[in-house]
Amino acid sequence: MTSPTSYSSYARTTIGGRSPPTTPTTPVPMQSLGVPHAWDSPGSGSSGELSEHKSSAELDDENTIQMQTRPVYRRTHSSSGRSTMHSATPSANGSEGVTILTSDYDQVDALLHSIYEKTQQDAWFAPNPSAGAIADASLGGVAVRISNPTGGGAFPSPALDGTGTPSSGSGTPHQLPTFRTFPYNAPHLVPFVSAITALNPAGAVLVRNAAVTAAVGRVPLNKDSISLDTETRIQVLPRLSDLAHAEKDQCGAFIRRPPSLVLYAPDVETLVPLAAEFEEKLIKHVWRTRSADAPRSARGSSAAPGVLTGLFGSAVDVASIPEGEDDIALATREGSSASLAPEKAEETSQPEAPKKSAWWSWRLQPKVKPRANADAEKGAAPKERKLVLLGPLYAGCGAALAGYFVFAGVSILLEEYALDHDPRRFALILTLPVIFCVSIFFCLQLVGNISLILGPIAQYHENSAFYSAVKPAPNPAVDNNLPHITIQCPVYKESLSETIAPSVLSVKKAMQTYARQGGTSSIFICDDGMQIISEEDRQARMEFYANHNIGWTARPAHGKDGFERKGKFKKASNMNYGLALSLKLERHLAELEAAGVSEDDGECLEDKAMHLAVEEMYEESGRKYRPWACNGKGLRVGEIILIIDSDTIVPEDCFRDAAREMYESPDLAIIQHESDVMQVAHHYFENGITHFTRRINKCISYGCANGEVAPFVGHNAFLRWSAVQDAAFIDTEDGKRKQWSESNVSEDFDLALRLLLGGYTLRWATYSEGGFKEGVSLTVLDELYRWQKYAYGCDEIIFNPIFTWWKKGPISLQLRNFVWSIAPVHYKIGMMSYMFSYYGIAAATVGSIMNYLLLGLGPDLDRFYLHSFEILLACTVVFPALGNLGFTLLEYRIGHRNFFSGVVENLRWVPFFLFFFGGLSIHLSTAILAHLFSYNMQWGSTVKEVERSTFWIEVPRIWHNFKLSFLICFSAIVMMIVFASDAVPFEWQIPGYNWSIIIPLSLVVGCHILLPIVLNPWLMIFSY
């Protein structure tokens, strides 16, 4: 045996008794091609040495596969227990053979063989035995990733620094992924593997057949894509080496020279279906275009020119060259457009600031700002939508009805004054604003329920100013120049496998559809849990993000070295942190491009700019808090942002519709999609909240169709990035420019209000038909926390904390700006009635106790006072009775449900909502009082995964979270017992037969006690 050499060639398998060719071949590096390994068998000698090979007869007996006489890598076990790779060399005369037993194949080899067999059936040119051990370059191949990339981002590497803090610099060494290929002896796969390494797919297939050649040969030289059908546009690249700059989400790319098709996927399991899909579409395309003459230039040269579209919309021309020339000249196209919107340049035209009205604004139609380059002949002119006035009509009727109730009370006071001439009763007029505010929601619901039964519903199926029921029509002006869309997703400590991964994979399907339609997109995750979770979970997240080409940022943990994550929920400050880094990246990227910095060192300009942005933020913090970030390209923000939560499902085809709608309406800032529910637990509590969520969303859709201004709920919404930047503000606390308010719980309402004040429009869309799905609360505690957050946010919008009243007044500046803004009046009425409804629910317990004491101890009250029992009857008629009837008829009239099934569905949940809404009062009161008295009320993150529990776990948990409501309710029960007994004098007694006084308080108390019990699935099944 000779000593190991510095090169190795490839062994070629002979199957079915064929002898291996003996022609020597050119040595080719084999590390990237993943030659199958051979484990040392017992008796093979010391570690690191080749075992003696058996005779051919023995090999045939053991069902082995003979290999050509060529050195191969084989794995042996060293004394340290690690597997190492060694090379075997032939003897001097070259007669010694090396064999690999069939048992040497592992799962990856089996997968490679299976994929190759199923995807290379159309390889017409069989291997030529006289060509030696090297496979024919006209064939394709398969590659499967066997190791994930590591490093490459701006975050510390635990392997380098156990403290988690980098000693110098801000990046970590980048290790590329490794792939194993098949056929093993194929040198033409070396550039293939080199090209797909930058894309980092889980697997890839190289296809070279007649259909691919025919399709590529018909592509004009000035085209950079092939339209296989109306919804599938696949990129065409000049060379295999350009695959590193391909649009990854298309999962495929045609190569001009040599004519090839490369398919790649984030999951190996999808490679075969992907190949079958492309094969079907490709054959149909070739047959459909068979009568078209191929371009002469395409016939004359395999190196056909084309246009390459970069990841962010920049285009480069591919010049034509004679056949056989090695390189293809690339020239930048003049006037190339960038799809990204960096920080606004000074020359960018700013929209005119809306004129503020000095008094009440009655404007209904949003102002449409004309596009500067609008071309009516190309259909690019803004399309003004009709304004439906039913919403303003219903809001006006509701407000008028509330005013009637108020003046009815004044009428009672005047009648009583005419009798006894006692002016003191007019002090009750001070309560009229409170009565109006609390009753307006009731009145709007009454009018709205009547409209569900008797009002028109045709507008539900039509587009209008604030509502989209029909998808936008195809528009060549935007379809041929689709904008880049960024999917922004804030996450915390959710489970990667159960929550984050399903959401990302859902988004990836939509990104693939959009990429094949000609657009580009990227995922931008603001990860607030990256620096908090365990090292194992952190590495899993990093690998997942890297494998799916996700850009992410992570800030230090709250309180670590004094770092503060501002805000109650931290969501707004989390997104602001990521957007701030992205804007700094854009500025540094522009500087690098202006300086002519190249990517010769293998690091793209975006990553270089990302590291500079990280260093800038690190310096701004006094070198105390270094942000973590990775994938600079993914951190760039496109013209449109899709905001999603970590538990979200999106439709596969929704990006292009958003781009079209944004293009048609230049003043449109937000498209809020109606969301369905993504259920995970399927127990009765989740089913009840699912029914309620769907019902609320349907009612919002009906309201927006009537002309109500669309709400912004903070997720499943498309935002125009330029509008968000226009609405940005300077935070007075730290002097930084921010997009999301960190001082408000309701940061979504704050952004929507700033956009409305800036002259932009919000729109509610239903044409996704439930394709957007969101998670709901899985436990009653999480749902209570959600309502507490809403109540806290509403009080935050309306009132200042009490200790600031002496200098700021009781009414907040935000509400004053909203009331006197140019927003439509009916929008103000509807929004304020919604906020005041939380006060109505919160006042139920206190009002019932006061009603019990006032009517029980002082029955001769002024007629101005409205008894609780009368309020209870009115609420029963309007909400459970008329509300269920109206919603049932609405679903029937718009064609969504059969009438009788709707009646059954709505009535079956009446007991559920009786306990739920009856037990909300105390919990909302605590949230409102917490804000008024500046109590630091904290809520944990919502549970998004199913957590099984038992009776012994739930009972202590119920007492811990509901002890305040239990104490209040049991005290009320004791009070009623005492007042009904002889323990107090007769004149102080409230007898039990006085049911009109006792029923309201008993109902509230009973619902609060039973709420955490009957709405707890794990407690009711009595699992112990």
Image (spheres, helix red, strand yellow):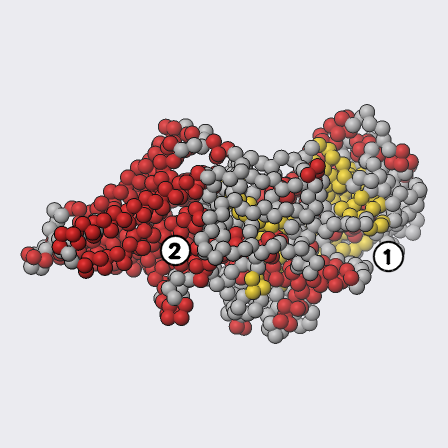
Residue 654 picture quarter: top right
Residue on which disc 2 sits = 791
Labels 2 & 1 near each other (Cβ < 8 A): no
User: Is residue 152 among the parts visible in the rendering?
Assistant: no
Which residue appears at 71% of the width and 34% of the height? Answer: 278
Residue type, label 2: Ala
Alpha-carbon distance for marks 2 and 1? Answer: 72 Å
User: Is residue 362 among the parts visible in the rendering?
Assistant: yes
- Which disc is residue 6 wearing? 1
Compared across the picture, whether 160 is left or right of 681 comes to right
Q: Residue furthest top?
A: 291
Residue 752 in percent (x, y) is at: 51, 52
Residue type, label 1: Ser
Between 425 and 234, which is closer to the camera in this rendering? 425
Mark closest to the chain's N terminus, 2 or 1: 1
Compared across the picture, whether 794 is left or right of 206 comes to left
